[in-house]
Amino acid sequence: MTAIDQLTDEQFERHALEVLKRELGAAGLARFLRLDRSGTGDYTRDREEWQKRLTLDQILESIRGHRRQTRL
């Protein structure tokens, strides 16, 4: 098996769901996925706040890094 830190986000999510299903059963996994995880605050305002400090080069590098990671 691949080390956890070498999995893509998609692979890691699939692995985590398999572990939850194995440990909790199908009904437990379904219950876990139904949990309401709404946070507090204003996501749109917060996102706008941190994004306004980013340069175009930083945004482009972030996109490139994500694409490199998902190709692994």
Image (cartoon, helix red, strand yellow):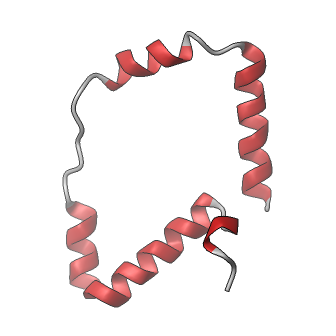
- Name the spot of residue 58 as percent of width and height, x first: 73, 22
Left or right: where does residue 31 sit relative to residue 7? Answer: left
Q: How many marks?
A: 0
Identified at 67% across, 76% down, the residue is 3
Looking at the rendering, in which quadrant would you find the C terminus?
bottom right
Left or right: where does residue 42 sit relative to residue 14? Answer: left
Q: Give the image quarter of residue 41.
A: top left
Q: Give the image quarter of residue 53.
A: top right
Identified at 45% across, 13% down, the residue is 49
Of residues 67 and 51, the one drawn nearer to the viewer in this rendering: 51
| Vertical comparison of 57 with 26: above or below | above
Left or right: where does residue 18 sit relative to residue 54? Answer: left
- Name the spot of residue 32 as percent of width and height, x first: 24, 68
Q: Give the image quarter of residue 62.
A: top right
Identified at 78% across, 18% down, the residue is 57
Identified at 38% across, 20% down, the residue is 46
| Vertical comparison of 5 with 44: above or below | below
Looking at the rendering, in which quadrant would you find the N terminus?
bottom right
| Vertical comparison of 28 with 5: above or below | below
Left or right: where does residue 16 sit relative to residue 29? Answer: right
- Name the spot of residue 15 as percent of width and height, x first: 52, 76
